[in-house]
Amino acid sequence: MSTEYGDMRAILYDTTPKHKKNFIELAQSGKYDSVTFHRVIEDFMIQTGDLATRPGSTQEDAVDYTIEAEFVDTLFHKKGALAAARQGDQINPKRASSGSQFYIVQGTVLSREELTIDMRKLNDGVGQLLQRDNYDSVREELLSLYNSQQFDAYTQKLMSLKPELEEKLGIKVEKSYAPERLEAYTTKGGAPHLDDTYTVFGEVIDGFDVIDSIAAQPTGARAIEKPNQDIYMVVDVEEVSKKKITQQFGYEFPVQ
């Protein structure tokens, strides 16, 4: 994927054959060429693939089909993941993918605690704890941190109350997490809240700096998130052996 900020090279997964086939067909037909990155959110993802964003195109040029979801346990939203965009669950309960739009994850690096603690349970438990009379000062501290938008400090304070939840209320907030996901999210980063709800069908293996450069571009209003200056891409497809990919880019394919 070539852009004015450099090239990204990605592999497509054999374990998501419908998405792989569709992407290759669109790319080889030239339909992805001159499409823009129309939605950019720093520390989250960069989205592209809307055929109606090509110069001279209209909304009628957008694809009118979806692709059946292909969720695979070993595929997740680490940095560089290619995943299919889709409509929301309310109108798309089967979570079918857009026929052309996809996003590339930038994400953020997360701590082990952020991944292995059930934040909903933690919040509910702290709410119960704060109802006790001897927690007035803790309640005031949390309220102050939240109102001043010090969200990292607010989250850390919540986590510091975990031992008291377990001891005084018997509430367990830890959750299991797959080792490979834990390793990726605590080193390279990603967007784990999207896991198992959007189809991941490939990953960038070279050009991570390009993801960062595009994600850093200024955009319009928060509800729009469109870059102020159009960012175009051109997509080429090449069939390369796994051995050559490993030799050239150091990417190790998982053992089947």
Image: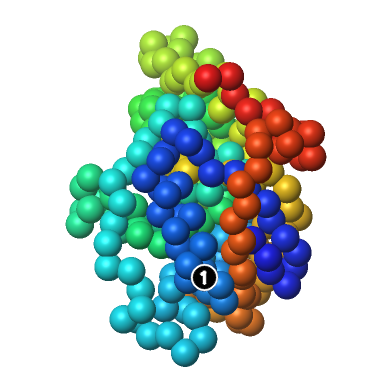
- Which amino acid type is shown beneath numbered disc 1? Gly
> Could you tell whether 197 is left or right of 149 in the image?
left
Looking at the rendering, which quadrant does residue 108 occupy? Answer: top right
Using the image, determine if residue 78 lies above or below residue 184.
below
> Which type of secondary structure does the marked residue at label 1 adopt?
loop
| In the foreground, 251 or 106 | 251
> Could you tell whether 158 is left or right of 109 in the image?
left
At horizontal 53% and vertical 49% (from top left) the residue drawn is 82
Using the image, determine if residue 133 lies above or below residue 229.
above
Q: Horizontal and vertical percent for residue 221?
A: 51, 77
Residue highlighted by disc 1: 30
At horizontal 56% and vertical 60% (from top left) the residue drawn is 46
- Extreme bottom residue here? 56
> Could you tell whether 245 is left or right of 39 in the image?
right
Q: Horizontal and vertical percent for residue 254?
A: 59, 24
| In the foreground, 11 or 83 | 11
Looking at the rendering, which quadrant does residue 119 occupy? Answer: top left
At horizontal 42% and vertical 15% (from top left) the residue drawn is 172
Residue 162 visible somewhere in the drawing: no
Residue 232 visible somewhere in the drawing: yes
| In the foreground, 87 or 170 | 87
Q: Which colour scheme is used?
A: rainbow
> Could you tell whether 253 is left or right of 88 in the image?
right
At horizontal 28% and vertical 46% (from top left) the residue drawn is 68
